[in-house]
Image (spheres, helix red, strand yellow):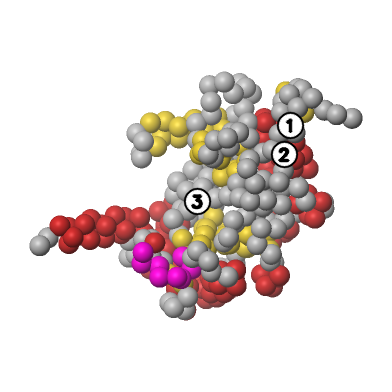
């Protein structure tokens, strides 16, 4: 049967068109594949998204991908909205909240390929510490695996447990569920964990925010705290082949093949299981010594801003 490329189909009560168009250049997948992916994995995606303000990355035909925070005025009225004041832009942002499959399908129809829920929960509380491990350009994946093991040692030393997943790009995410911690203290604890992991092997890892200061080392990024977001477990990325972020057992990191699985085979390879739910430990209290150590460490962005200004002044001085 030959499908009409522009024909409208209804999924979960949502009208969708152009389902057989390529999702984006190099995706090796169609919009239909994206819809099928969120339908197959909704029971695993929704626990990661429910209640959390959602930022998406969309891609339109023949256009560059773009980040979208505000839910468009044209969106269906049944999509829940979370209004959050943005200090950066001095305005209220109307974030969508993906609490059901119908919303996921509508977002897929809008070519919202990447799903980035807020790290803070729906009530604005700190529920996770997150370290984003970002290897330098051209580094083998083994470098980021080694960095993840250093983070795990730092967690063990602090009496904490975490889970790890691929970013869907070239890095790894370490997630530590926590409870009864203020947002500022969670951010401080994350900075301290990054610093402790860096001290275990400063030749291989760094907490330097400025790219020029990393010098070929894996960046241990603690800046997801507060208003940060994180690429969703089981969510695809706008990368060649449309890879999907998936959980990994700590003892299976050496078996990870970067770029796998993809949008077209993730649901089949995962089957009915939810390894992310299974690997996440129960929320834990954050040790106060970790918080105290982190309070003495400046925010990486603030430190980088001051350092950038210092370097600019130095260049201007004779």
Label of residue 126 in the image: 3
Q: Which of marks 2 and 3 precedes in the sequence?
A: 2
Q: Are marks 2 and 1 in contact (CB under 8 Å)?
A: yes
Provide the residue designation for mark 1.
Answer: 19
Disc 1 packing (10 Å; few <14; some 14–19; many ≥20): many
Name which residue lies at 76% across and 22% down: 8
Q: Which residue is drawn at 68% across and 66% down?
A: 256
Give the image location of residue 176, x and y in percent.
57, 60
Q: Quick one: 258 or 24, which is closer to the camera? A: 24
Residue range of the region highlighted in magenta in the rendering: 212-219
Quarter-of-image position of residue 147: bottom right
| Residue 244 within the segment the image draws in magenta | no
Disc 1 + disc 3, Cβ < 8 Å: no
- Closer to the chain start, of discs 1 and 3, is 1
Quadrant of the snapshot with the C terminus? bottom left
Visible in this render: residue 122? no
Asked if one can make out residue 258 in the rendered structure from this viewpoint, the answer is: yes
Q: Position of residue 266 (x, y in %)?
A: 75, 52
Compared across the picture, whether 216 is left or right of 245 comes to left
Q: How far apart in space, not on screen, are marks 3 and 2 (Cα)?
A: 36 Å
Look at mark 2 in the image and give the residue it sits on: 30
Q: What SS does tag 2 mark?
A: loop
Q: Position of residue 59 (x, y in %)?
A: 58, 37
Up the image or down, 235 lies above or below 186; here it is above
Element type where label 3 sits in the image: loop
């Amino acid at each position: 049967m030959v499908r009409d490329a522009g024909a409208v189909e209804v999924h979960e009560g949502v009208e969708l068109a152009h389902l057989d168009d390529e999702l984006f250049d190099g995706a090796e997948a169609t919009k239909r594949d994206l819809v099928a992916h969120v339908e197959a994995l909704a029971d695993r995606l929704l626990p990661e998204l429910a209640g959390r303000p959602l930022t998406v990355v969309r891609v339109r035909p023949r256009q560059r991908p773009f980040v979208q925070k505000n839910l468009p005025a044209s969106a269906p009225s049944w999509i829940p909205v979370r209004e959050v004041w943005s200090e950066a832009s001095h305005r209220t942002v109307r974030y969508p909240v993906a609490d059901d499959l119908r919303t996921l399908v509508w977002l897929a129809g809008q070519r919202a390929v990447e799903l980035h829920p807020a790290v803070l929960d729906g009530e604005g509380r700190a529920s996770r510490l997150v370290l984003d491990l970002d290897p330098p350009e051209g580094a083998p994946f083994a470098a980021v695996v080694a960095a993840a093991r250093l983070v795990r040692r730092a967690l063990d030393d602090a009496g904490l447990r975490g889970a790890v997943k691929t970013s869907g790009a070239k890095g790894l995410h370490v997630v530590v569920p926590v409870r009864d911690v203020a947002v500022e203290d969670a951010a401080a604890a994350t900075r301290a964990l990054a610093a402790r992991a860096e001290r275990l092997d400063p030749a291989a890892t760094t907490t330097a925010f400025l790219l020029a200061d990393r010098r070929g080392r894996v960046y241990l990024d603690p800046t997801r705290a507060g208003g940060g977001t994180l690429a969703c477990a089981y969510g695809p990325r706008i990368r060649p082949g449309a890879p999907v972020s998936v959980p990994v057992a700590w003892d299976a990191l050496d078996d990870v093949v970067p770029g796998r699985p993809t949008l077209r085979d993730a649901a089949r390879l995962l089957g009915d299981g939810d390894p992310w739910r299974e690997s996440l430990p129960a929320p834990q209290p954050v040790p106060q010594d970790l918080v105290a150590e982190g309070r003495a460490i400046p925010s990486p962005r603030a430190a980088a801003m001051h350092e950038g200004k210092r370097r600019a002044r130095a260049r201007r001085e004779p």
